Every structure is written in C-alpha cells, then in structure tokens.
Image: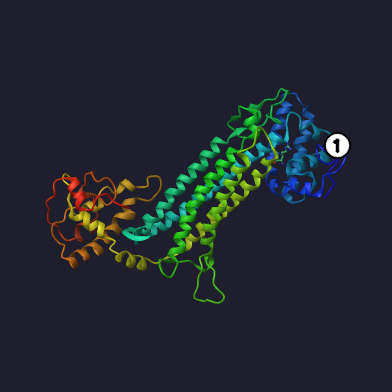
C-alpha cells in the first residue's frame, strides 16, 4: 500500500509517497501491535501529567482519556482498524484517536516523541513478559518437584561423561533442574528490577522545554523512578538484551533436560516413555515413538540464543541516540519470549506425564561398577572421622532444598542406602571384601562433618552387615594416594 503521504505524522512535508518497498521495510505494525495496551497506558499517564502541569487543558485530557477508552475497546473486541501505511502501532493508535475525538488528540503528543514513547511501551511489555516467563518456570519447577517426590526412592545411575558413575536417585536428578530454574527465575526477576525506570520525558533525545513532571509519569506506570539521562533513555536496549541473555541461559537448561528426555526415552536407555500426547509416530516404522517436543525444545534453545546475539549485533555499533535499527529489537525480543514460553510449557507437559521405569533405572545402576567409588571410599579410613557405613548417610541436609518441600535426606538417604546395601554389599560379598571397612565421610557433603548415628534411617542400621574397624594409613595424603589421587571427574 502506498498511501503514506498525509497519513503519517510526518507526511505533510514530503512531496511524494514512499515506495512500496520502503513501506514494507519500514512498517513494524505486525510486530509492535502487541504493545497496543502498553501504548495506551503510556498515553494515559502522559496526558494526565500534561493536564496536571497545565500544559493541556483538563477538558482535552478528558477527551483524550475517553477516546483512549474507545480505542482500547476496539483493540480488545477486534474492531480496531489497523493500517499498515501508518507504520507502527503508536501512529495507528494516535490516528484512530484523532478520528474519534478530533483536535485534542493532536495535543497528546506535546512534550513527547515516538522515541521515548516506543521505549516506554517496550519496557512495560518486557517487564510483564519477564513476570510471565518466571511464572511459567515456577510451574515447571512444581512439576519437577512433584515427580521428584514421587521418585525419591527410585535408584538410577548417575553419569559423568555419560558413563555410569555412581548411583543417585531420580528425585535428586530432577531436583537439579529445580535449582537451575530457581536461578533462572531470579535472573529474570533481577532484570525486571533493573529495567524498571521510566524513559518518558526524554522526548526525541534531549528532553523537552515543557515543564513536565517525570516523577508523575514514572509513578503512574509503576516505574521506580525516571531515567537519569535522556540519551540513554531513548538509545539503550540493554534491558531487552539482558532479558534475552537470561532467557538464553534458562533455555539452555531446558535444552539439557530435553536432551535427557531424548536419551531416557530411547530404546537403548529405556528409562522412561512419553505418553501419546507428547510423542509422535512414524508412518513406516510403527515401533517408533519419537520425542519430537523434547527435540524441538533442544533446537529452539539455540534460536533464543541467536536472538540474543542478533540484538547485540544490532546495538553494538549504534552511535547515540536513536536509530531505526532499534525498531527490530521488538521482533527479536517478542519472538524469544514466545519461543521460551512455548518450550517451558512443553517441558512442563512432558515432565508431568512422562512414565519413568524404575526397574530399568535400577538395573542400569547395578551395571557398570557404579558402586566402585563407594567401595573404595569405604575401604579407606581417614583419621578423625566417624567410620562405617553410616557415614554414607551423614550430613544429608547439606543438600536440603530449604525453600521447597523437598528434603534431600528423603530424596537421597533412603535410596542411597538401598543402592549401597543392594549393590555394594552384594558386590562386597561376591568379591570377598567383607573386612576392614571404614568410611572416611559422606559420599557428598562435608567430609569433616560429625556423624550422629542416631540420624541414620532404620534401614541403615539393619540392612548392612556389621563392619569391623580398619586401620588408617595415618594421613589423608596417603589415603588419597591409595585412591589414585585427585578425583578426575
Ligand atoms: N516504530 C519505531 C520503533 O519501533 C518508532 C520510532 C520512530 N522514531 C523515529 N525517530 N523515526 O523504533
């Protein structure tokens, strides 16, 4: 469409209309229409402030406010007449306001430029998007915690280098992702705090001569304060960059979990299967259940990182202050949030419904010498430490997840006892290694922690054979030497 002249805010002084291709490259409406409600909120706050400061009349403000009600109604009921030739949502809203209320609409733009208007809307949008993404992550955490609780006693092999290392529990494994998601959420929340300053009043780049009240608009929009520097206000997009970096890190965690689902549901692992709702089949290989959603999460994590990188590339060589390059920040940011939210929803759905196969996990844990380290540790006493198998269960609460209902001692202690009892003790007798067992410290946790045998679960007292004392080599170094030096993991 090529009807730009006279319709845009700036068309009046141009003799010819833009080329269609110019329209095409310049138009951001398809993307920034998502900020329509933020735009109206910003305009309301600005008009109220202009009236309060006597810059426009109260009558004009009333007309503007009720006209904006009308525009909002149209946006919500789908009757808003979007016009691509008006370039972006900001000019669309203002043009529609003018159609509805006439002359007072023109006074709304007093002491404001699209440069501070756009970035105000964008900050508002990003602020609530950060909240939304954080809430979805909390939902995923809830699903992980529920499944972890259900599988607090499910023994599985723990891996390093994807090789069976030591037995862990599925509960403990899943809770690792809960921890990652906690940090991801705190990064998102942190970003929302840092971005929460108002750019309004910076106008095009150098502020305005009108006696505006920037604190008033900042407060009305829920910002903590106005931004200190007007050039920074219109030029900076590090808030969006930071949000994308945070999403990229969080998506990396989703991708690792997705990869585990792909591995675990493969026939070779056989640790889990996805329900019909979360798998696809093959038309020519009926035996297959493909973990497509997990694979797509894995791929999409890279797309989010790519958007972060693209935005950084768009910004890094921009001289101050505003340049149209900054129009593409919205597309990259909206897309990253959409992709991220979809990935979190998919992961939540998969985690809620995936069917774990405890028998297969336990059988895999029994293979591959997964208790070799425990056996070695058991045989080597360290002076000054409590000895014996009970040390396996010492300091369990070192891993206690205090802020949620998951006690490490419940998720780990019982099953590790079983792992040790079933796997290690079995191996012990098979190998004739029944004597001389002292244990230097807990498998994980502070090796110097005092161990109170009263803390032990009953199984620990009954399931393992009594173990005689064994003399230490006398020094930690000598014991480490016997163990083959530092842990190469
Ligand atoms: N749609 C534009 C954007 O998102 C609006 C800003 C236009 N400012 C200007 N000086 N041309 O950045």
Which residue in the structure is indicated by mark 1? 12
Q: Is residue 410 above or below residue 59?
A: below
Q: How many marks?
A: 1
x 24%, y 55%: residue = 457
Q: What percent of the width, then of the height, locates residue 224?
A: 58, 31
x 55%, y 39%: residue = 192
Q: What percent of the width, then of the height, locates residue 107?
A: 79, 31
Q: In the figure, residue 95 lies in which quadrant?
A: top right
Observer-nearest residue: 375 or 321?
Answer: 321
Observer-nearest residue: 190 or 300?
Answer: 300
Q: Is residue 348 above or below residue 427?
A: above
Q: Is residue 361 above or below residue 5?
A: below
Residue 56 left/right relative to 120: right
Q: What percent of the width, then of the height, locates residue 229?
A: 62, 27
Image quarter where ligand 1 lies = top right
Q: Is mark 1 within 8 Å of ligand 1?
A: no
Q: Is residue 103 above or below residue 391?
A: above
Q: What percent of the width, then of the height, locates residue 453?
A: 20, 50
Q: Identify the residue at the far front of this view.
A: 317
Q: How is the image coloured?
A: rainbow
> Does the rendering let one see residue 106?
yes
Observer-nearest residue: 259 or 117?
Answer: 259
């Amino acid at each position: 469409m090529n009807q730009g002249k006279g319709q845009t805010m700036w068309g009046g002084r141009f003799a010819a209309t833009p080329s269609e291709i110019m329209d095409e490259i310049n138009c951001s409406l398809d993307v920034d229409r998502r900020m329509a409600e933020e735009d109206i909120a910003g305009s309301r706050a600005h008009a109220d402030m202009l009236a309060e400061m006597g810059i426009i009349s109260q009558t004009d403000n009333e007309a503007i406010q009720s006209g904006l009600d009308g525009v909002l109604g149209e946006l919500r009921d789908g009757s808003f007449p979007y016009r691509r030739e008006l370039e972006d949502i900001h000019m669309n809203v203002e043009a529609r306001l003018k159609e509805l209320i006439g002359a007072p609409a023109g006074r709304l733009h007093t002491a404001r430029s699209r440069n501070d208007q756009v970035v105000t809307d964008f900050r508002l949008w990003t602020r609530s998007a950060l909240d939304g993404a954080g809430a979805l992550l909390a939902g995923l955490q809830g699903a992980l915690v529920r499944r972890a609780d259900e599988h607090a006693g499910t023994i599985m092999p723990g891996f390093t280098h994807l090789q069976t290392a030591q037995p862990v529990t599925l509960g403990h494994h899943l809770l690792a992702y809960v921890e990652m998601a906690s940090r991801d959420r705190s990064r998102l929340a942190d970003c929302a705090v840092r971005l929460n300053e108002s750019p309004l009043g910076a106008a095009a780049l150098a502020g305005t001569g009108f006696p505006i009240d920037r604190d008033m608009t900042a407060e009305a929009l829920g910002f903590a304060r106005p931004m200190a520097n007007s050039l920074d206000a219109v030029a900076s997009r590090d808030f969006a960059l930071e949000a994308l970096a945070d999403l990229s890190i969080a998506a990396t965690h989703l991708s690792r979990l997705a990869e585990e689902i792909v591995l675990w549901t493969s026939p070779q692992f056989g640790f889990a299967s996805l329900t019909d709702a979360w798998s696809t089949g093959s038309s020519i290989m009926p035996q297959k259940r493909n973990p497509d959603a997990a694979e797509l999460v894995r791929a999409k994590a890279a797309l989010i990182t790519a958007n972060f990188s693209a935005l950084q590339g768009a910004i890094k060589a921009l001289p101050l202050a505003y340049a149209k390059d900054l129009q593409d920040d919205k597309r990259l940011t909206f897309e990253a949030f959409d992709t991220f939210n979809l990935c979190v929803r998919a992961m939540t759905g998969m985690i809620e419904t995936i069917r774990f196969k405890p028998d297969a996990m336990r059988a895999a844990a029994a293979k591959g010498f997964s208790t070799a380290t425990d056996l070695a540790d058991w045989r080597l006493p360290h002076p000054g430490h409590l000895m014996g198998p009970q040390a396996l269960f010492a300091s369990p609460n070192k891993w206690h997840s205090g802020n949620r209902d998951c006690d490490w001692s419940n998720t780990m202690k019982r099953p590790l006892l079983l792992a040790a009892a079933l796997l290690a003790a079995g191996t012990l007798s098979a190998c004739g290694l029944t004597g001389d067992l002292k244990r230097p410290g807990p498998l994980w946790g502070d090796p110097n922690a005092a161990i109170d045998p009263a803390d032990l679960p009953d199984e620990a007292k009954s399931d393992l054979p009594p173990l005689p004392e064994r003399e230490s080599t006398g020094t930690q170094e000598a014991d480490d030497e016997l163990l083959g030096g530092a842990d190469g993991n």
